[in-house]
């Protein structure tokens, strides 16, 4: 069964253990467009987990490192992560255009424009306008916007150039609703705990996948 092409669901695979990660990835893959790995899995299982996940599922892998360093350090990190097989890297935009460009020169990049947690209101949200402008200038593969605030997703989408994808974490455990955020203009929803920490990850992924159909 290959639903991955029409899926708009990304699994945030935030577990430490290699075996558990591979097991969850394998049993949910039918319902996913991509798998997102973050520091917990990379620290727990090593960078090779990216290659293994791709081999086991055949899905794209997004490395959510939220890179936020000077251009040279961003470049040093991103080159190893793309070499390991990552298809996309998430980078922070607030560090400036040169730092983001250093990642974009090496591969497909997703820029954080606004985050999903309450603390994002303190410093990130006030910078969103500038980050949207940066994204429109650099034209990355996509940007991150908060599923917890669908009205912000709609606003960001309305200001963003066509063709730049909107990826939205915050569905499920953080309170965001899949259909609501897709209706607001998200291209993809990113879901972690509601899938990997559920009793039946495959069923949870299937339910979410079905919620996204026909939106
Ligand atoms: P949960 O368990 O809350 O996991 O479904 C969400 C995943 O997405 C990441 N996350 C974000 N990544 N900008 C990002 O780039 C954000 O605003 C954001 N909010 C959540 C989180 O680290 C986890 O992997």
Image (cartoon, helix red, strand yellow):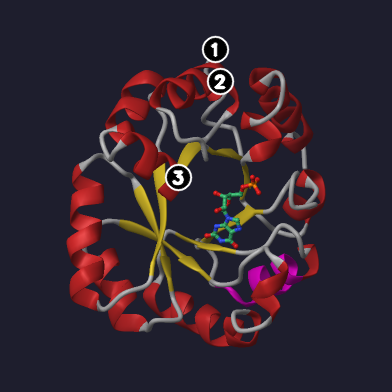
Q: Which mark is residue 40?
A: 3
Counting other residues with Cα less than 10 Å from the Cα at mark 2, is it few (<14), some (14-19), or many (20 or more)?
Answer: many
Q: Please name the residue that numbered disc 1 is placed on.
A: 1
Residue 38 visible in the shown view: no
Counting other residues with Cα less than 10 Å from the Cα at mark 1, is it few (<14), some (14-19), or many (20 or more)?
Answer: few
Callout 3 touching callout 1 (CB < 8 Å): no
- The C terminus lies in quadrant: top right
User: Which sits earlier in the primary sequence, circle 2 or circle 3?
Assistant: 2
Q: From mark 2 to mark 3, how far is it between C-alphas?
A: 24 Å
Q: Which residues are magenta?
A: 152-160
Residue at image position (37%, 50%) is 88
Q: Is residue 157 magenta?
A: yes
Q: Nearer the viewer, mark 3 or mark 1?
A: 3
Q: Which mark is residue 175?
A: none
Residue 41 visible in the shown view: yes
Q: Nearer the viewer, mark 2 or mark 3?
A: 3
Q: Is residue 206 left or right of residue 23?
A: right
Task: Determine the main secondary structure of the stretch shown in magenta.
Answer: helix
Q: Nearer the viewer, residue 159 or 13?
A: 13
């Amino acid at each position: 069964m290959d639903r991955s092409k029409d899926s708009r669901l990304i699994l945030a695979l935030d577990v430490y253990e290699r075996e558990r990660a591979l097991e969850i990835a394998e049993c949910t893959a039918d319902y996913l467009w991509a798998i997102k790995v973050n520091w917990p899995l990379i620290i727990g299982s090593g960078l090779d987990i990216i290659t293994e996940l791709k081999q086991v599922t055949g899905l794209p892998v997004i490395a959510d490192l939220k890179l936020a360093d000077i251009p040279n350090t961003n470049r040093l990190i991103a080159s190893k992560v793309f070499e390991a097989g990552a298809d996309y890297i998430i980078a922070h935009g607030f560090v400036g255009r040169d730092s983001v460009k250093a990642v974009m020169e090496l591969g497909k990049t997703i820029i954080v424009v606004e985050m999903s947690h309450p603390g994002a209101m303190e410093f990130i949200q006030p910078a969103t306008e500038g980050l949207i402008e940066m994204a429109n200038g650099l034209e990355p593969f996509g940007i991150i916007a908060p599923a917890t605030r669908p009205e912000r997703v709609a606003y960001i989408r309305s200001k963003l150039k066509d063709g730049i994808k909107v990826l939205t974490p915050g569905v499920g455990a953080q309170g965001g609703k899949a259909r609501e955020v897709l209706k607001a203009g998200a291209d993809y929803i990113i879901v972690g705990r509601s899938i990997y920490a559920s009793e039946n990850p495959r069923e949870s992924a299937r339910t979410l996948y079905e919620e996204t159909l026909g939106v």
